[in-house]
Image: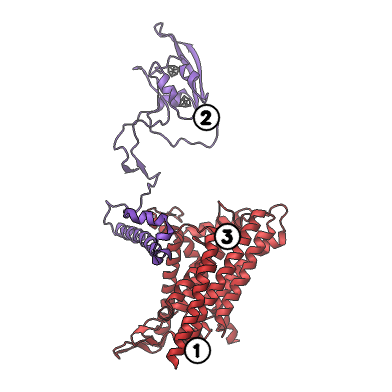
Chain colours: A purple, B red
Amino acid sequence: MSRPKDAMNRLRDPEALSFWQRTYVPEILRGLKLTAAHFFRNLLIHIFHLAGLWKDRRGAETVQYPEEVRGYSPRLRSLHRLTKRDDGSPRCVACMMCETICPARCIYIVATEHPDPNIEKRPASFDIDLGKCVFCGFCVEVCPEDAIRMDTHILNFAAYSRQEMVWDINRLLSNEPQRVEGIGEIRKVK
Amino acid sequence: MLEWAVAAGKVAFSLFVLLNFVMVLTWAERKQSALMQDRIGANRASILGFTLLGLFHPIADAIKMVTKEDFVPQGASRALHTLAPFIALFFALISFAVIPLGDELAVGGCTISLQVIDLNVGILYVFAAMSLGVYGFVLAGWASGNNFSLLGALRASSQMISYEITIGATVVGLIMVFGTASLQTLVRRQGDLLLGFLPGWGVFYQPLGFLLFTTAAMAETKRAPFDLPEGESEIIGYFTEYSGIKFGMFLMTDFTETVVMAGLVVTLFFGGWQFPYLQPDGFHFPGAAVVSISPLAVSIAQVMTFLVKLAVFCWLFLLVRWTFPRFRYDQLMRLGWQMMLPLSILNVLVTGALLLLLHR
Ligand code: SF4
Ligand code: SF4
């Protein structure tokens, strides 16, 4: 609803308002009309939904999160995963770049020698404490081997203890990338 | 003996109506505000997987309130701190007693008035109960041992007292028109037709009085846009130091007051249980057409009419509550004392003058 410009100016200057406007009654009625219109429109849509009609119109903007999710953007930084070589071993060479840059200091790597003489090192253990992680994505950017990524689109990894929030190398390796589809679209889950 | 049983029955029925309205209102508030704001609202509480549009939330709320810790701050007066919510809720509940739910019901040879008690000063009784209820809020602020709560209580009492004056003054016009302060008689007199076809409801005699009364009634219920006494999180109200069921009682007081005020508006200005053209023996339409129905059906229709009107006004109060932003305190006082009070006195004068002219 756009309002003529001079009406806007008159609102700022109470002296210029007419008596009727200064009683606030017209604006009160306009406000009530607006909210009541929303109320009845949404009520009608919900009633039609109950009858199985008008399914394409939403009666509310709410996304009912666990049951409905929106398609995430490819830029979204979600739970980490460690990428694998063709033989399934981690690509990570334990260069410690990510551990060094991590502003939250939540990556803990123990390096060990790699059996292949062409590869210098491999991680003996690789833990990320997600309770501390700030999801800045620096670890992904800094990695020279493209060994760590944050494209799993997993967001609900909350746990009941701090220990469970620490993801070790096996859990990180088992995460799979998520295909990006329908960015922003609301989908029912299951 | 029978009298006592009837009296107890009436109290029980009246409380049943009131408390159920209060409970459903807590649900309606959440759902209605959600619809108005394109949201969904509370819909998760479920029993065996049934959510019933979130209707279990009032029950869940009640369980939560009862099981929460009942905290009394250090330095608070324990007895008064506990007493305050009881006072507030008690006076809110008893003020519903004089609101008629229907006309007389004739069963088995005796007539029962569908109203807990028909005082000939019914309106004054409601005002008295409301004024006494203020003690609950003042005590709550005073006994909390918290200066902010005390300030909240002062805001609450000054606001309620200011607006009670307007309420009292607007009702004077109505009493002059109908010549009674008993709510039951008032409703009966609203059954007459105005100009032969309009239902003779108070709002047609006192349109300005209706506007003023409704506004002041909203201020009395201490809900937005008049919720300065509470201002839950920002300006700190009188029940800051309350938790658990005592806090719940204050919330309930608010909702009860909303229902009572809606009931008062309906009774005073919208013909209470009067269904248009429905007389004790059936419908009397303006064109002299008469449709007669049994007295029992008439009684049921009257109670239903009252409940529907009550629901409509509760809806309206919620609509207002979720539409407008809060007043600033000086605006609130200016509205009450400089606009509404003079207007209500003017209303009385004009009503008096008109009555004098018409009756001569
Ligand atoms: S996202 Fe940031 S905080 Fe989290 S592990 Fe990577 S570098 Fe550390
Ligand atoms: S930066 Fe990459 S290769 Fe280096 S330790 Fe981290 S994950 Fe491994």
User: Image check: B21 left or right of B165?
Assistant: left
Chain of the residue under label 1: B
A83 vs B236, nearest the viewer = B236
Which quarter of the rendered picture does the N terminus of chain B lie within?
Answer: bottom right
Q: Which of B48 and B265 is in front in this view?
A: B265
Disc nearer the start of the sequence (3/1): 1
**Which residue matches tag 2?**
A132
Residue B111, numbered circle: 1
Does the CB distance between marks 3 and 1 fall below 8 Å? no
Query: Label 2 to label 1, Cα distance in Å?
Result: 74 Å
User: Quarter of the image holding residue B96?
Assistant: bottom right
At horizontal 39% and vertical 81% (from top left) the residue drawn is B275
From the viewer's perspective, tell me whether residue B239 is left or right of residue B276: right
Mark in front: 2 vs 1: 2
Quarter holding the C terminus of chain B is bottom left
Which tag is nearer the camera, tag 3 or tag 1? 3
Q: Which amino acid does label 2 sit on?
A: Lys
Q: Which amino acid does label 3 sit on?
A: Pro
Q: Are marks 3 and 2 in contact (CB under 8 Å)?
A: no
The residue identified by callout 3 is B229
Q: Which of marks 3 and 2 is in front?
A: 3
State the CA–CA distance, disc 3 to disc 1: 44 Å
